[in-house]
Image: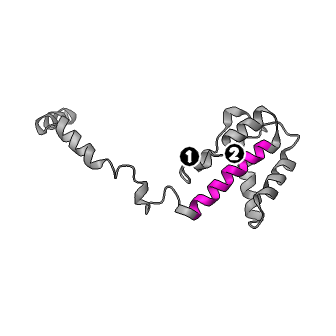
Amino acid sequence: MSNQITVSDIFRRALEIRQANPNADYKSVKSQIVSEFSGKPFPLPAFLTIPEYDNIAPEEDWTAGLPVVLRGIQTEDWNEIAHGIIISLEQVENYPKESGREDDPQKEWRNRDKGIAEAEKKNLDKWMPDELMNIAKRSAKQ
């Protein structure tokens, strides 16, 4: 079981291929993935994720190709799996070029609290008047 290939393994291999030859087109990366993995056991659909990309690109980008990968696993078709990997790879590679990293502190527009902070304060003030806040603070200290 420890030699079971995962979708993350295939994705990392696609990244390695791109790093070794940055000018290679996606079609040649896909061909290399297919030739390297053909004949090997298919990845388990239970591990259909690329978790290391959670904070690097938005989920809708790094997961873009996963439905295609799943279809490839279900139909046992390495071409489909490689195609899905390439979709996600392309999205992940293009995201930083177009907008920077998701976890970049300079990306103020990514601050999800920014748009709701004022409304949140207003609602807390409305539902937690000062006397209730004081009671809650005293209770917390005890």
Magenta stretch bounds: 80-97
Q: Is residue 8 above or below residue 18?
A: above
Label 1 Cα neighbours within 10 Å, binned few <14 / some 14-19 / many ≥20: some
Tell me: 87 left or right of 79: left
Q: Residue furthest bottom?
A: 23
Q: Main secondary structure of the magenta part?
A: helix
Residue 1 is situated, as x and y percent measured from the top left of the image, at 77, 33
Q: Mark 2: few, some, or many residues within 10 Å (few <14, many ≥20)?
A: some
Question: Based on the displayed image, in which of its 4 quarters is residue 20 positioned?
Answer: bottom right
**Which residue is at 53% across, 51% downward?**
55
Q: Is residue 134 visible?
A: yes
User: What residue does disc 2 label?
Assistant: 8
In the displayed structure, does residue 96 sit left or right of residue 81? left
Q: Considering only order in the chain, which callout, 1 or 2, is on the residue closer to the N terminus?
A: 2
Label 1 sits on what residue type? Glu
- Position of residue 63 measured from the top left corner of the image (x, y, whole percent): 62, 45
**Colour mode of the rendering:** one colour
Residue 102 drawn in magenta: no
Number of the front mark, 2 or 1: 1
- Considering the numbered disc 2 on the image, is that residue within a helix, a strand or a loop? helix
Compared across the picture, whether 30 is left or right of 87 comes to right
> Can residue 91 be found in the magenta stretch?
yes
- Give the residue drawn at x 71%, y 41%: 68
The residue at 49%/56% (across/down) is: 103
Question: What label does residue 59 carry, if any?
Answer: 1
Q: Please, what is the three-letter code of the amino acid marked with disc 2?
A: Ser
Q: Secondary structure at mark 1?
A: helix
Could you tell me which residue is drawn at 79 percent across and 56 percent down?
Answer: 27
Please name whichever residue, 141 or 40, is drawn nearer the observer in this view of the structure.
40
